[in-house]
Amino acid sequence: MNLRRTLPLLALPAAAALVLSGCSSSGSAGAAGDDGSGGAISVVASTNVYGDIAQTVGGDAVDVTSIISDPSQDPHSYEADARTQLAVSRADVVIENGGGYDAFVDTMLSASDSSAAVVNAVDVSGLDPDAEGHTDDEHADDEHADEAEPSADATSDDHADEHEHDHEHGAFNEHVFYSLHSMGALADEIAHQLGEIDPDQADTFTANADAFGDRVADLEAQAAEIKTAHDGESVAYTEPVPGYLFDEMGLVNVTPASFSEAIEEGDDVSPAVLNETLKTFADGRVDLLAYNEQTSSPETEAVEKAATDAGVAIVPVTELLPEGDDYISWQQSNIDAIKAALDR
């Protein structure tokens, strides 16, 4: 995501207070028992998506800080300030997306003496074939794999051969927070790491992760129902944000890779590529357009207009939790919107 049209960032002191609010239950971050949080485990997450999952698993035992919760900020280009660096250096657990999405987290970890347990969502997901590997613990692999079909891992494999266009023609799609199964596995890994720090509450963390996983499994079941009804239907997106969710639904991305790649990287879209993209709507090949609300440019607006003119349903998507939503309600809204658009 590259934010070409966003509100200007605030001056550093105000921005620091803003970005560190997130899901924090106490408004501060620090090592467990050392930061005024009453002995709570300090968790720092790169975005409010991961902050919310950590809060769900940890409950009152954690003090969660989400670095980015403002949709005007882009994880790809975020520059940390001293306050954010301090929060990371004091954290007991750090949760990052990985895959180059929020590289600022690794930069801050490298610049500090942090001994935090680092949970990398891309590694946990197993979706990146070029990743160094999964987390060291095997417990999070497939605990919820049998709860609903198809799982994100399974659908990723199923569609790898049949839909080579998916995920930017082979380029890794780092937006793993739209992989439902992966987020169930992530909750398990968070529970494990929290239990290592506070063994007395390990069973509670595991129970919370299991409950979250059950709700994720329900979302997976709904995605499977959409696949039954709409398998093979064509969709487009301005960026590959919802790619994994589309995979679970059996939807086929027909967006020219050169278009979505350019939008994601903030590069110029050539007239030829833009015309090719607009033509997919004029030809009637697209059943739905997913439009990243956090990114706006003349090119994405032209695509939105082409979809509107062609009578194609437009589903807004985001990379951060909207205010008032948790992970489950956010993805439920996405699934409901996609289903309504396809059922028209």
Image: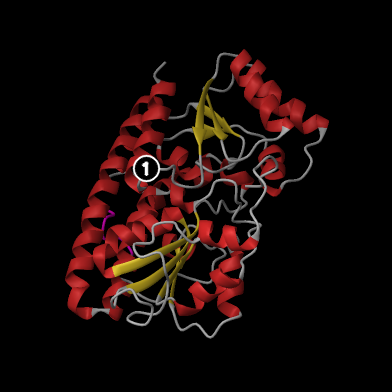
Occupied quadrant, residue 39: bottom left
Along the viewing direction, whichever of 10 and 145 lies nearer the viewer: 10
Residue 37 in the figure: left or right of residue 201: right
The segment highlighted magenta reads 141-145
Q: Position of residue 244 (x, y in %)?
A: 47, 45
Residue 99 shows in this picture: no
Relative height, residue 31 to residue 129 (above, below): below
Question: Of helix, strand and loop, which one carries label 1?
Answer: loop
Along the viewing direction, whichever of 278 and 60 lies nearer the viewer: 60
Q: Residue reaching furthest right? A: 271
Q: Position of residue 129 (x, y in %)?
A: 54, 61
Q: Position of residue 71 (x, y in %)?
A: 55, 46
Kind of residue indicated by mark 1: Gly
Along the viewing direction, whichever of 44 and 14 lies nearer the viewer: 14
Residue 305 shows in this picture: yes
Which quadrant is the C terminus positioned in?
top left
Q: Which residue is mark 1?
A: 324
Instruction: Decide: few, some or many residues near mark 1? Use Cα within 10 Å; few <14, some 14-19, many ≥20.
Output: few
* 298 inside magenta stretch: no
Q: Residue at x 22, y 66 (%)?
A: 206
Q: Residue at x 52, y 40 (%)?
A: 162
Occupied quadrant, residue 21: bottom left
Q: Main secondary structure of the magenta part?
A: loop
Q: Residue at x 35, y 47 (%)?
A: 326
